[in-house]
Amino acid sequence: MSGFVSLVGAGPGDPDLLTVRALRRLGEADLVLYDALVEDQLLELAPNAKRFYVGKRAGRHSIDQEGIHRLMIRAAERGQRVVRLKCGDPFVLGRGGEEALALEAAGIAYEIVPGVSSAIAAPALAGIPVTHRGMAAGFAVLSGHATSAYGPAVDSIAPGSLTLVVLMGLRTRVEIAERLIARGWSAETPAAVVLGASHEGERRWIGTLATIANAEIDTELAGVIVVGEVVKLASVIGASHAIATTAAAANHRVR
């Protein structure tokens, strides 16, 4: 008897931002393997499932990736409907590709359920469009957790040519800013940090590459860094957008 695995993107955290298919798969699940930053509100949408935490946080012990593969495969081989619940989108710095390959190799039936990536959602919720006519025709998403991850990308991007969105980069923001400036980016390039996007208490910091080092930021929170001229739009779009979003969330929260 063979089960089925759904690699599901949970979006930035607000249940209202789940896709319809993600909501359906959670309701049908026998087992949910969930990441760090997935909140209880999302897990409550899987009332009949066993829930097992498999998240990874910097500097903390956690199950390794091979262990996650084994859990998915064994559960599916027992005929269970498995949801691998990942923050954002499974294929945006989420190791969803590795999990899909493991399921392929094991002959397990599976699907990909895309999610709203925080690389786009966090800036948008802070009033920052990652592309805007006359300011940025494209954007690049970087992993900021280590120099080996962001270094080659930073070095290959012409200064000011794209909006840069950095995930997992709060602890390395100083090094990233210094590297960008050394590569020719102006120290006055607008920069933003969005913390807790789509969550209650969401907040943002706005400054420049020169001042980001002095920003008072809790690096234990989930945060996204945005660098580029589009950050200037937050002062225009952000205020009214935040009010509208808060009001809509209060009236239409998924229950």
Image (cartoon, helix red, strand yellow):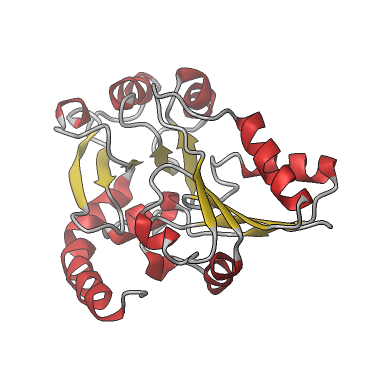
* Residue closer to the observer: 199 or 116: 199
Q: Position of residue 163 (x, y in %)?
A: 41, 45
Q: Position of residue 141 (x, y in %)?
A: 48, 41
Quarter of the N terminus within the rendering: bottom right
Question: Picture quarter containing residue 197?
Answer: bottom left
Q: Position of residue 61 (x, y in %)?
A: 44, 24
Residue occupying the far bottom of the picture:
251
Q: Position of residue 155 (x, y in %)?
A: 49, 24
At x 22%, y 54%, the residue is: 202
Taking 215 as reference, is 174 above or below it?
Answer: above
At x 47%, y 28%, the residue is: 154
Q: Taking the image as drawn, is residue 69 in sight?
A: yes
* Residue closer to the observer: 169 or 235: 169
* Residue closer to the observer: 157 or 27: 27
Question: Picture quarter containing residue 170?
Answer: top left
Taking 177 as reference, is 130 above or below it?
Answer: below
* 36 with respect to 192 (left or right): right
Q: Taking the image as drawn, is residue 100 in sight?
A: no
At x 28%, y 49%, the residue is: 196
